[in-house]
Image: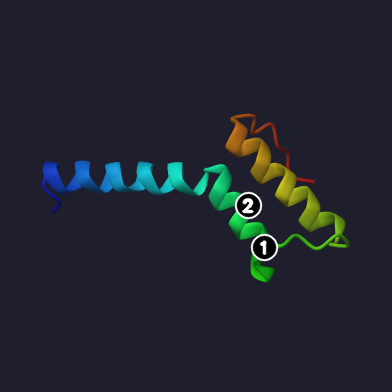
Amino acid sequence: MMTRNKLEKGEGLAAEVRRQFGAEAVTRFLRTLPAFRIEPDIPDRFEQLLEHLDRVEDGDAGWRRQ
Protein backbone atom coordinates (compact mmCIF):
# COMPACT_ATOMS: atom_id res chain seq x y z
CA MET A 1 0.00 0.00 0.00
CA MET A 2 1.28 3.44 -0.91
CA THR A 3 1.44 6.10 1.74
CA ARG A 4 -0.20 9.43 1.07
CA ASN A 5 3.20 11.15 0.92
CA LYS A 6 4.50 8.71 -1.72
CA LEU A 7 1.30 9.05 -3.70
CA GLU A 8 1.56 12.85 -3.69
CA LYS A 9 5.22 12.69 -4.75
CA GLY A 10 4.32 10.31 -7.58
CA GLU A 11 1.52 12.56 -8.78
CA GLY A 12 3.79 15.58 -8.58
CA LEU A 13 6.50 13.79 -10.55
CA ALA A 14 4.00 12.69 -13.20
CA ALA A 15 2.73 16.26 -13.57
CA GLU A 16 6.29 17.58 -13.89
CA VAL A 17 7.20 15.00 -16.54
CA ARG A 18 4.04 15.87 -18.52
CA ARG A 19 4.85 19.57 -18.23
CA GLN A 20 8.41 19.10 -19.45
CA PHE A 21 7.44 16.84 -22.35
CA GLY A 22 4.96 19.47 -23.47
CA ALA A 23 7.59 22.21 -23.46
CA GLU A 24 8.45 23.71 -26.85
CA ALA A 25 12.19 23.07 -26.46
CA VAL A 26 11.65 19.35 -25.78
CA THR A 27 9.22 19.08 -28.69
CA ARG A 28 11.73 20.71 -31.04
CA PHE A 29 14.49 18.39 -29.81
CA LEU A 30 12.36 15.25 -30.20
CA ARG A 31 11.46 16.21 -33.77
CA THR A 32 15.16 16.05 -34.65
CA LEU A 33 15.39 12.41 -33.53
CA PRO A 34 14.57 9.85 -36.24
CA ALA A 35 12.43 7.72 -33.92
CA PHE A 36 10.10 10.66 -33.23
CA ARG A 37 9.85 11.99 -36.76
CA ILE A 38 6.47 11.58 -38.45
CA GLU A 39 6.71 9.97 -41.87
CA PRO A 40 4.85 11.93 -44.55
CA ASP A 41 3.39 8.81 -46.18
CA ILE A 42 1.89 6.93 -43.25
CA PRO A 43 -1.25 4.85 -43.81
CA ASP A 44 -4.55 6.67 -43.38
CA ARG A 45 -5.51 4.58 -40.33
CA PHE A 46 -2.37 5.63 -38.45
CA GLU A 47 -2.91 9.25 -39.41
CA GLN A 48 -6.46 9.04 -38.02
CA LEU A 49 -5.13 7.58 -34.77
CA LEU A 50 -2.55 10.37 -34.44
CA GLU A 51 -5.27 12.95 -35.03
CA HIS A 52 -7.36 11.25 -32.36
CA LEU A 53 -4.47 11.47 -29.90
CA ASP A 54 -4.15 15.18 -30.64
CA ARG A 55 -7.87 15.68 -29.98
CA VAL A 56 -7.70 13.74 -26.71
CA GLU A 57 -4.74 15.83 -25.57
CA ASP A 58 -6.75 18.97 -26.38
CA GLY A 59 -9.74 17.63 -24.45
CA ASP A 60 -11.97 16.95 -27.48
CA ALA A 61 -12.31 13.16 -27.59
CA GLY A 62 -15.29 12.95 -29.93
CA TRP A 63 -14.29 9.64 -31.47
CA ARG A 64 -16.40 6.84 -32.81
CA ARG A 65 -15.03 3.51 -33.88
CA GLN A 66 -15.26 2.99 -37.65
Q: Quadrant of residue 36?
A: bottom right
What amino acid is labelled 2 in the image?
Arg
Residue under the image location 88 percent in, 62 percent down? 41
Task: Say which residue label 1 marks.
Answer: 32
Q: Residue furthest bottom?
A: 34
13 sits left or right of 44 in the view: left
User: Which of the pair 39/54 is nearer the observer?
Assistant: 39
Residue under the image location 29 percent in, 43 percent down? 11
User: Which of the pair 39/24 is nearer the observer?
Assistant: 24
Instruction: Name the spot of residue 58 as percent of width and height, x first.
Output: 61, 32
Task: Say which residue label 2 marks.
Answer: 28
Instruction: Name the spot of residue 3 as percent of width and height, x first.
Output: 11, 47
Disc 2 packing (10 Å; few <14; some 14–19; many ≥20):
few
Instruction: Name the spot of residue 50 as percent of width and height, x first.
Output: 71, 50
User: Which of the pair 15/61 is nearer the observer?
Assistant: 15
Q: Secondary structure at mark 2?
A: helix
Q: Secondary structure at mark 1?
A: helix
